[in-house]
Structure formats: structure tokens, C-alpha cells
Image (cartoon, rainbow, N blue to C red):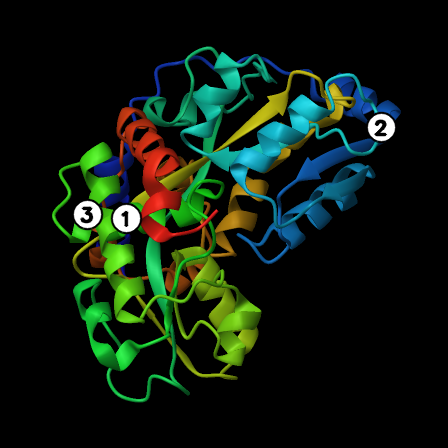
Amino acid sequence: MTNTMMKTLCMTTAMTVGLSGVAQAQAVDMDALIAAAKAEGTLTTIALPRDWCNYGAVIDGFKAKYGLEVNELNPNAGSADELEAIKANKDNTGPQAPDVIDVGLSFGPAAKAEGLITPYKVSVWDSIPDSAKDAEGFWYGDYYGVLAMAVNKDIVTDASPTSFADLKDPKYAAMVAIPGDPRTGNSSMMSLYAAGTAMGGKGGADTATAGIAYLKELKAAGNFVEVGGSAQNFAQGTTPIMMDWDYNVLAMRDKLAGNPPMDVVIPSDGVIAGVYVQAISAYAPHPNAAKLWMEYIYSDEGQLGWLSGYCHPIRFNDMAARGVIPADLLAKLPAPEAYAKAIFPSLDEQSAAKAVVAEIWATEMGVQ
């Protein structure tokens, strides 16, 4: 990636995410925190697939650096499942009680409102954009991506679709999938939102309604596959065109290594970006290990771990300005122009969209 491209990407990120960062970092006695975390001995995570955002290497890096065990609960759970796990284990200090969560942006305020998370401001707090964090420190953005299409070229042998509009073509019969149920998974919810944007949605509830109508139309035409998109289903041809975050499909492309060959396409008519957020459970059995985990994943080392998995770390601008991002990692990023049109739905828009999906998804799509 050239310096010009690098500057363009940084400017694009700053414009879309915002980087006002006026909150002050708190002083952290790392020696004391490390000692307290080691005394607890374990960190319990939830909903962190090891091939999502390079989480496997990030977790292993944390274990190697601090000598703690990491109990990895239900890697394929959705954001709603994570909050339910906290609720279900309020009085449980055993291995099924998560210490930390990684959820879609709209789930952070929901967890705060329900008293499920506790505040903690990491030592690099001031370099996290204000637009991507709770002012009191209850939740804070960790990484973001945009929705992309993975296209199995063993099955789609002609030109790949480049837009949501293209997917209406009868030649894509029984091919198009989203990751899962949009009522419980953020990537599925935002896939629906991206489709609604492409169909002219004006934001929030209107976009969700348009997205549901679009998927209903695809289903009626026989193009929509009612099976969750996954690497296995994609490779086997069950979901040959699937939506997911760019970092997931790019990592899947690396893992599949040409078997099958695949294209990664950012839809031209619906570029939606999504921020995920971290938080510590208010009932964490290992609160110091949880804080140490936050310090690790928000450090340059942890942020670069995510970038290695194609996730755009929330502190990208800060690290780029300080010149600490290796050139080989920058070279792997998609072209900056792919992100120039990215829309970051606000919390209010996401909340309104989720309400619509909760109300009419089952009826419109004919599912439970």
C-alpha cells in the first residue's frame, strides 16, 4: 500500500468513525493488575470463534504473555446469547459464567441498561474514538468491518455479482445466504440492514423494513437459502453466495486457499460498516483477569492481532499516526476506496431496526 493510499485510508476512517477522543486515560498499575489476574488464574470468554478476527492468535498471545488459562465458551454464540449467558449465571462463579463479552454496537447500551456490565477505562482510553465508546466506560469499540459477499467460483462460474440488486437474478437460485438469524446475530442483522440500504432504505426502521422485504423477495424467487452461511456450508456449495463481515470472508479465503476458489465483493449499492464493542460482566468471576484482557486487546500488540485477521482495530488511526503498523499488514487491507462509501448506522438507527426485525421477521419470512 502506498503512502497516499495509507493517508486516504486514515482520512476515510477518521471521517466515518470520528476521532475526537477527549476522554482521559486512567493510570493503571500493570504490575498489580497482572499479579491480581494471575491469582485468579483464568479468564472466561464467550462467542469468540478462533477464526473470527484472528481471535485464536489473540487469545493464544494473551495466554503466552500472562500465563493465564482461557476458558472459551460457545464460540459460535451471537450477541444476544452473550447477554443471556450473563443473566443466566449471575449467581454462578463456575466455568459457564463469562467474564467479558464482544457484542454488536447496539448490545452495549442494552447491557448497560440492564445492569449486566461494569465500567472500566483502559489505559489507552483517550485513543478510542468518542463515537465508539460509552462516556462512563461501560463499553467501548474494539474493531469494525464492512459487509461483503463471498462468492464460490466453483459454482458461480461467470462474473460474480457486484450488488444486492444483482442477487435477484434467477441464475442465483438457491445460492444466497446470510450468516444466521438477524434477531440474534449482529452480522446477520447488519447483512439485512445493508440489503435494506441498497433497496433505498432511509435509515433505522425504514431500512430494516426494506431489508426484510428484499430477503422475502429473494426467498419467494427461490434465491435465498435458509441455512446459515458458514465456511463449511460455503465450501460444500450449500451457501455459494454468502454475506458476512469483510474480515470473516477474507480470513475464510485465506483458510480455503483456493479450494474452492472465491471472490470477495463489497456490494456497490449497500456499504454498511459495523463496530463491535467489548465489556466486562458485572458478575465476572475473574474481574482482574477481565481488566487485564482489556488492557491486552487494546494495546498495540492486541490491536495488531486483530488487524492480522483483517479487522480494522478501533485504534487504527492512532497507531497509523505513530507508524507502528507493519507494512505487510497494511498491504493486505482492501483498497481504501472500498470503504469511502461506508455508512456507520447510529445506535438509534440500529435500535429502531432491531425493533422492526423482532416484530415482523418471523411473520414475513415464515419462520419460528
Residue for point 52% across, 84% down: 259
**Residue 83 against residue 310 in the figure, above or below:** above
> Which of the 4 image quarters holds residue 274?
top left
Q: Secondary structure at mark 1?
A: helix
Residue 358 numbered tag: none
Q: Which residue in the structure is indicated by mark 3?
A: 197
* Amino acid at circle 2: Gly
Relative image position of residue 186 (x, y in whole percent): 44, 42
**Which numbered disc, 3 or 2, marks the residue that appears first in the sequence?**
2
Query: Can the viewer see residue 312?
Result: no
User: Which of the two labelled residues, at mark 1 and mark 2, occupies the earlier sequence position?
Assistant: 2
Q: Residues within 10 Å of mark 2 (few under 14, many from 20)?
A: few
Q: Name which quarter of the figure residue 2 lies in.
A: bottom left
What secondary structure is marked by label 3?
helix
- Between the C-alphas of marks 3 and 2, the distance is 43 Å
> CA separation, marks 1 and 2?
40 Å
Residue neighbourhood size for the residue with mark 3, other residues' Cα within 10 Å, grouped as few (<14), some (14–19), many (≥20):
many
Q: Position of residue 278 (x, y in %)?
A: 54, 30
Which residue is depicted at the point 33% across and 27% down? 351
Question: Which mark is nearer the camera, 3 or 1?
Answer: 1
Tell me what residue is drawn at x 60 percent, y 34 percent: 82
Mark number, residue 94: 2
Badge 2 marks a residue whose secondary structure is: loop
